[in-house]
Image (spheres, grey):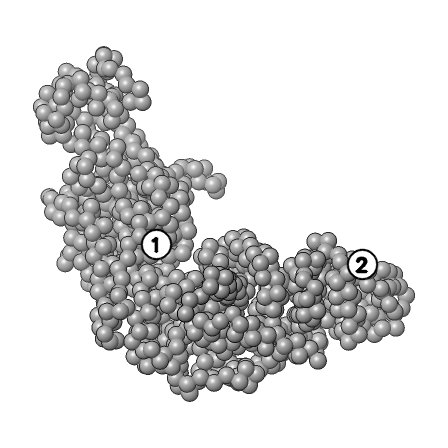
Amino acid sequence: MSAALTALPGLRAGSPQVMGAFRIVPLLRESAPGDLRIGKEAYDAYGMVRLDGLPEETGLSYMSYVPHGLVIAHTQDGSEATLGASLFRRSGGTSLGRDKPRRVKLHHRMVKARAAEDGSARFRMLPLHLAMEGFLALHFRGPDILWQEYSEQAARRGLDPRHETSVRGTWLAGFEDAVRLFEIHEHQVGVLVFVADALATVFVVSHPDDYRKLHLSLLEDFFGELLYTYALLYPESPRAESRIDPRAVTDLDHLAREMDRVRTDFRHYTELLAQGLFGRPAHTETVRDLGAFTLQRFYPDFDPREECHIGEQILRRDGTVEYMKTFRLSHAQVRRAYLLEKLAAAEWDLDRAMVLLGAASKTELLKRIANAGFGYLLKPHLLRGLPVEPGS
Amino acid sequence: MTLSPIHASRVRQDRVAQEDLLLFVNACFACTGQREFYGDGHGQRVSLDFLHRYILGNYRALYAQVLALGVNHMNQALIVKNLLATGRDTPAAHRARENALVTRALHTLPTHRAMHLLEDLAKRGVNNRRTRALTQRYLADARSRDFRAVKYRRSFRRAAVHAHAPFTGELGPFMLRGLKERRFTTPLFESFRQAHFAASAIYDLPFTVAEGLAQKHGVRREVFLERIGPKLTHHERLRLSGAREAAGIAADVDWSRQPLARIASYTLSLSLAERDERKVELAGAFEASAARAIRRTAARFGRVACVLDRSFSSYGSSEKRQRPLAVALAVAQFLRAASDSFLGLWTHPLSPGGELMVTPRGATDLATPILAALRHRPDLLVVVSDGFDNDPQGLAGQVLEAGARLLPRCFMLHLNPVYDSESFAPKALSPAVPTLGLRDAEDVPTLVSIARFAAESGTMAELSRELDARVRAFLDGAS
């Protein structure tokens, strides 16, 4: 399943608003049908998500700080979906240490159905964690064929434990101000956030009212450390402007046309900047089929030379994006994924992987595996023989 | 003809002086040292303080004359304070005029500003002969001495002690012995004394003093608000109108005495439902106030188009709640009443309820309404905005520039109620269109004339003449 992500049909990019390193582009939709509504459910707690089995049993878990979940209400016949009051009840999952500030909250599954009310079906999902879980689960089972280089742990537990780090939105220098000062449009349903003109995230919901409520939740999302660095290194976004030459304008109609041209220029510039996400093929995986909608997660071909975004989306049958959230992987994360992908493609045979990865020698390949943080997959004596480089 | 080097440098100097002065006046109209939407309060104060020091150090005579231009009270007080603190730098030739300006300014400031200014001088240890004389004269003013002594007792005492002002008559016992005194013959002092022991006496006192004493005596709020009614000032009456109405008392606000921006702020503080309910009353208030302002300024404009910013940033800050939006609304009301034909265009279309239902919402698309305004072919195009246009960025300035070329007979002006601390001025949309700081709608005629002057790049001599005339008018108002 590999197809280019459609560049958000049904949505129109507005003019960017620049605040320091951040360029935030609003995404507008003239009329939202209202049959899919999204609301927030706050947890503000460390989350432990059981991916299989029941929450109380042992098994595969995803652990991360989970500040909030999204509750999605939808109808099949196109009638208005209602979120209702139950949205804002702090419920779902069992908490350890009742009545205390929550330290760990147990969630059952990334996506979990809720009781339907007022004719709207509902489910709860953990935004972005859904996509991140998909990313972490890639080749999670480890080598299919146990070549002699692999350690006992690789054979028994695969990649477990697999982990990646990210940074909270509030930690990005200047992001709080940028989000606070951003002027939300009347018909706005989403944003593209750029840090120093690198696409950081896409966030789209279905209805403008929902977006207004969820705007500040951008601060609770997580971002790759690449963007954390960019926000520190570039206090100002690169300046982009399209000008009208006042001397060349002949009359007011001409001026109106020129204004349209400037707006189009800004739109094209935004599209250009977002090429890294929308211009590249992606693998999609359907997580839940909702009848009129589909919840998917997607990831690109991991290529260390390109920017890579993972994400999740809800698509209407006609392909309209009703919800989307993406995460930009940092270089190290892309390299790790690339390595795993090539190893899997070579059926974990190191000799074949060496060719696929263009490594000069087996020692170099082993070093690359160890440097990527997967040393625990290899037998210790192989690692001991590797030349040590400072800082590696 | 060639200019001699000396003459050329003189011209340059004048040019710089003129620009500096305009910069300063602009800042003094817009900045109040409070937090804005885009700038924090500290930055605003530091920036403004620098500007004051710079102008005071380089153009002392002009600095004093700014008092006559109707800049906001906070800046007037700051100018007076800075002038008094550096009295020894006054050239002998300017001394008389500076004294007159400072005295006049102190007496025209609202009493609370003036009293706090005097207290501030005492706190900063500014103690010279001129300051002492000024303070003594201000405090000794027979008409309001007792009232000020009661309402601003702490500031009064501090300023008086600092300035060695004699406590004549019963002022001595009142300030120094206070409640220990058995009996005062001054009615207000006696009420003040009695009010500490009997609830019935509090209604002869100023509202702010009585309010605390009412609490002490456990007077019910409704009873207090009703009986204190006659003692309320215009501003207090407006501020308490909601509470008084809730208590079943007529608010009884004299709208024609309120400046437009204050009525606008009050309107915006109401919920949409309340505004809708009181639409007629509020419209009447605007009309009365605008009519009074027009009478006072004798302003009359021809075909006017006005582009008004109601983007989210016009919310201002929690310190200046909806201030930029209120000023925009006030300007719209003023210009509608003061022009033959008026077209008001907001950055985001109004709801069917009309102008009074305006809320800060949406992005700042100034370019589209400016184009619509240009199609109206006005004589005067006024843009009221904080200068941050972002839909798309920078387009509004270019459209204005192009418009200025296409309609050379239309005079364009950008009025900005927000001071940008980084550029030491209200943020401009385009260098081709004059940008001026804005405080209240009544200032619009003044600002239009200043802007015309700046646009025609008049000489320093003309500017001095203009300033001189204003200073004389300001001082003659003393009577």
The location of residue A47, given as percent across then percent down, is 36, 39
Residue A337 sits above or below residue B171 on the image: above
Residue B213: x and y in percent read 74, 65
Screen quadrant of the C terminus of chain A: top left
Q: Amino acid at mark 1?
A: Val
- Residue type at tag 2: Val
Q: Tag on residue B191? A: none
B360 or B477: nearer the viewer: B477
Q: According to the image, label 2 marks what residue?
A: B161
Instruction: Please identify the residue farthest to the bottom as the structure is shown.
Output: B340
Q: Residue at x 87, y 64 (%)?
A: B173
Mark 2 element type: helix
Q: Which residue is depicted at the point 49% across and 58% down?
A: B424
Residue A18 is marked as 1
Q: Along the horizontal axis of the image, is B97 left or right of B27?
A: right
Query: Could you tell me residue B54's position as x and y percent?
Result: 56, 56
**Residue A186 or residue B225, whichever sits in front:** A186
Classify residue B92 by image quadrant. bottom right
In the rendered structure, are the residues bearing label 1 and label 2 in contact, judged by CB atoms less than 8 Å apart?
no
Question: Could you say whether the residue bearing mark 1 is in a helix, strand or loop?
Answer: strand
User: Which chain is indicated by disc 1?
Assistant: A
In the visual, does A96 lie left or right of B158?
A: left
Q: Are marks 1 and 2 on the same chain?
A: no
Q: Residues within 10 Å of mark 2 (few under 14, many from 20)?
A: some
Image quadrant of residue A318? bottom left
Report crowding for label 1: few under 14, some 14 to 19, many 20 or more residues within 10 A (C-alpha).
many
Is A221 above or below relative to B65? above
Relative depth, front residue between A92 and A303 = A303
